[in-house]
């Protein structure tokens, strides 16, 4: 598989422009050192530090989709400015939520306004606040699968052609995990 980079700066820094430009697809093996999403830690400064030490792909920290859509100041504080993000590529933004329309709108904003290279849905967060708001790993129960699949389809449509991925936890059985993963692909 290959990941198409939507907005990457010239590695030499001498592109002559302040804006992003399209580059050829990057072979996935070249993306071997990945900075995983960490709440409260995967901010721009941390990602840039990791890239200086060889990281080839980074995720943002988990962002609340609804707040991302409704609060421009929140978006700006997370992405700072396009100029700062030029050397932060490839970048995948990770969202949490349980509402297809909010997740789709967040994906569209992240791709359209911020030029991210991928969008991820967090289905693995075990924190108490995730349970209270019904996101993360609390959406892995079979009763929530239709909602999750709907969210992923909406995100994929809104983010196209940028890839949408999902961080999941293993389910009680291998068969359930495979069945769930296949549902996410549909």
Image (cartoon, rainbow, N blue to C red):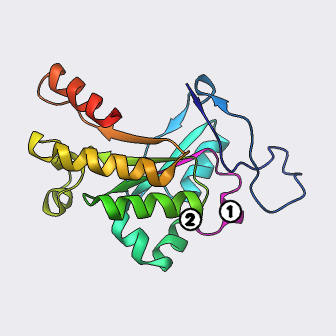
- Residue 65: image x %, image y %? 37, 63
Q: Earlier in the sequence, mark 1 or mark 2?
A: 2
Tell me whether the residue at label 1 lies in contact with that at label 2, contact meaning CB atoms closer than 8 angstroms.
yes
Does residue 76 appear to the left or right of 22 in the view shown? left
Q: Is residue 100 magenta?
A: no
Does residue 46 appear to the left or right of 153 in the view shown? right
Q: Residue at x 46, y 74 (%)?
A: 74
Q: Residues within 10 Å of mark 1 (few under 14, many from 20)?
A: few
Asked whether the viewer can see residue 55, the reply is: no
Quadrant, the N terminus: top right
Q: Residue at x 11, y 42 (%)?
A: 141
Does residue 132 appear to the left or right of 38 in the view shown? left
- Residue 23: image x %, image y %? 75, 41
* Magenta-highlighted residues: 80-93
Circle 1 is placed at which residue position? 84
- Residue 5: image x %, image y %? 65, 42
Label 1 sits on a secondary structure element that is helix
Q: Residue at x 20, y 50 (%)?
A: 147
Residue 4 occupies which quadrant of the picture?
top right
Task: Identify whether 115 is placed above or below 164.
Answer: below
Residue 131 occupies which quadrant of the picture?
bottom left
Does residue 105 appear to the left or right of 130 in the view shown? right
Circle 2 is placed at which residue position? 79
Q: Is residue 85 magenta?
A: yes
């Amino acid at each position: 598989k290959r990941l198409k980079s939507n907005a990457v700066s010239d590695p030499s820094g001498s592109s002559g422009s302040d804006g992003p430009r399209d580059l050829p697809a990057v072979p996935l093996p070249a993306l071997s050192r990945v900075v995983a999403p960490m709440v409260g830690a995967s901010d721009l400064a941390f990602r840039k530090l990791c890239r200086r030490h060889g990281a080839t792909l980074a995720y943002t920290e988990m962002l609340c989709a609804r707040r991302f859509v409704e609060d421009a100041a929140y978006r700006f504080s997370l992405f700072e400015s396009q100029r700062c993000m030029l050397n932060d590529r490839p970048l995948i933004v990770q969202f949490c939520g349980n509402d297809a329309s909010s997740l789709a709108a967040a994906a569209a904003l992240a791709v359209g306004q911020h030029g991210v290279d991928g969008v991820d849905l967090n289905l693995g967060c075990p924190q108490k606040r995730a349970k209270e708001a019904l996101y993360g790993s609390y959406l892995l129960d079979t009763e929530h699968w239709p909602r999750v699949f709907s969210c992923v389809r909406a995100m994929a449509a809104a983010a196209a052609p940028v890839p949408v991925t999902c961080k999941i936890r293993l389910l009680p059985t291998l068969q359930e995990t495979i069945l769930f993963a296949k549902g996410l692909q549909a």
